[in-house]
């Protein structure tokens, strides 16, 4: 038994020595791994499993540019990026830090432009903690049972929304998505485009006025790349896309554009619940545009 333990330690040390990143072992030519926490489960995530995970994106100098909890379907690493290979290395309860190519992550996984502060071929850190692991069968079975239980909640939400709009005497017409946009202060003429890095203050609350989230109370503005997956709910992204830099607005967001039929992953926002977001668009950092020559070269590389 001791000999096996020494062998395992030796392999780990050897793996770390092959890595240019202290404490990280090499998984492949461009992916590195450091286990931060063991879990009691032994079953690793597989393709088509569903994971609920706390995820942090960082630069190599540990500057955090995203932190959040997401429920994600594990997909093919070849098609959807190397981050899925990272998911498949972890079991429920485990936490690890990965160093992966930023280009692969943003282009394959998120299918969006890379932030301007990350250089070409630069690597980034992704910290992943698996909170729950479900097979596709268990996830769909649970979802079906849940939806049967709350099938009337959707109609009830519409009644509450109608009453709220009438009681608050809201005169603006909603967008086709059902989102109400109530401008409190005008911005300048800088619009938000896909790939821009936006900085916002927001407060989220229920129709009864009770708060469930506030960057202002934390005194920490939220920054994210517009158009990127796993950043904010669809309705809030749609709302910010209608704003200009410096604008302050209220948005009333129905659940189908918000936290949906299952509610938030944290359980704070219940299923079929409309929400209100008070948003200040503080800054719009325009994305670095590729030149026509760069785009052509990128296209040629894919063809070859």
Image (tube, helix red, strand yellow):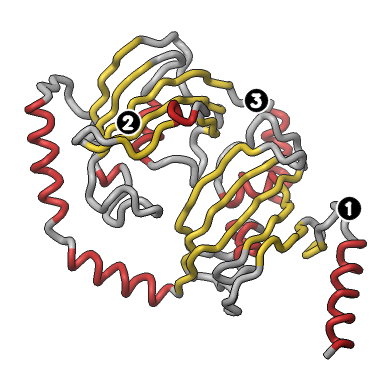
Q: Residue at x 64, y 38 (%)?
A: 64
Give the crowd class for mark 2: few <14, some 14-19, many >=20 residues within 10 Å. Answer: many
Q: Residue at x 69, y 37 (%)?
A: 63
Quarter of the image with the N terminus in it: bottom right
Q: Is residue 259 left or right of residue 16?
A: left
How far apart marks 2 and 3 lie (CA) works out to: 29 Å
How far apart marks 3 and 1 lie (CA) works out to: 29 Å
| Residue 265: % across, % down | 39, 54
Front in this rendered view, residue 175 or 284:
284
Residue under pointer 1: 20
What is the total number of numbered labels drawn onto the structure image?
Answer: 3
Marks 2 and 3 close (CB-CB < 8 Å): no
Residue under pointer 3: 288
Q: Residue at x 75, y 45 (%)?
A: 123
Give the crowd class for mark 1: few <14, some 14-19, many >=20 residues within 10 Å. Answer: few
The residue most toward the bottom is 1
N-term mark: 3 or 1: 1
Residue 89 against residue 56 in the figure, above or below: below
Of the two numbered discs 3 and 1 in the rendering, the one whose residue sits closer to the viewer: 1
N-term mark: 2 or 1: 1
Tag 1 secondary structure: loop
Q: Which mark is residue 277?
A: 2
How far apart marks 2 and 1 lie (CA) works out to: 44 Å
The quarter of the picture where residue 76 lies is: bottom right
The quarter of the picture where residue 32 lies is: bottom right
Of the two numbered discs 2 and 3 in the rendering, the one whose residue sits closer to the viewer: 2
The quarter of the picture where residue 18 lies is: bottom right
Q: Is residue 166 left or right of residue 260?
A: left
């Amino acid at each position: 038994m001791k000999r096996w333990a020494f062998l395992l330690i030796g392999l780990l040390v050897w793996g770390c020595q092959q890595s240019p990143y202290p404490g990280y072992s090499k998984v492949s030519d461009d992916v590195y791994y450091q286990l931060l926490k063991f879990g009691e489960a032994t079953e690793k995530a597989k393709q088509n499993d569903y994971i609920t995970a706390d995820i942090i994106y960082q630069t190599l100098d540990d500057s955090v540019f995203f932190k959040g909890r997401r429920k994600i379907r594990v997909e093919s690493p070849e098609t959807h990026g190397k981050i899925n290979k990272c998911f498949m290395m972890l079991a429920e309860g485990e936490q690890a830090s990965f160093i992966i190519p930023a280009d692969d992550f943003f282009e394959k996984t998120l299918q969006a432009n890379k932030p301007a502060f990350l250089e070409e071929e630069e690597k980034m850190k992704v910290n992943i903690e698996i909170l729950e692991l479900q097979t596709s069968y268990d996830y769909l079975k649970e979802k079906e049972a849940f939806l049967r239980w709350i099938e009337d909640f959707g109609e009830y939400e519409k009644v509450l929304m109608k009453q709220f709009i009438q009681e608050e005497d809201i005169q603006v017409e909603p967008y086709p998505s059902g989102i109400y946009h109530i401008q409190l202060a005008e911005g300048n003429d800088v619009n938000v485009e896909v790939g821009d890095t936006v900085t916002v203050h927001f407060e989220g609350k229920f129709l009864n006025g009770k708060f469930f989230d506030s960057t202002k109370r934390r005194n920490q503005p939220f920054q994210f790349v517009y158009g990127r997956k796993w950043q904010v709910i669809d309705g809030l992204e749609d709302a910010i896309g209608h704003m200009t830099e410096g604008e302050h607005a209220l948005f009333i967001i129905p659940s189908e554009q918000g936290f949906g039929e299952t509610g938030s992953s944290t359980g704070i926002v219940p299923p079929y619940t409309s929400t209100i977001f008070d948003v200040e668009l503080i800054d719009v950092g325009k994305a670095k545009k590729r030149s026509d020559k760069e785009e052509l070269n990128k296209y040629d590389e894919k063809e070859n």
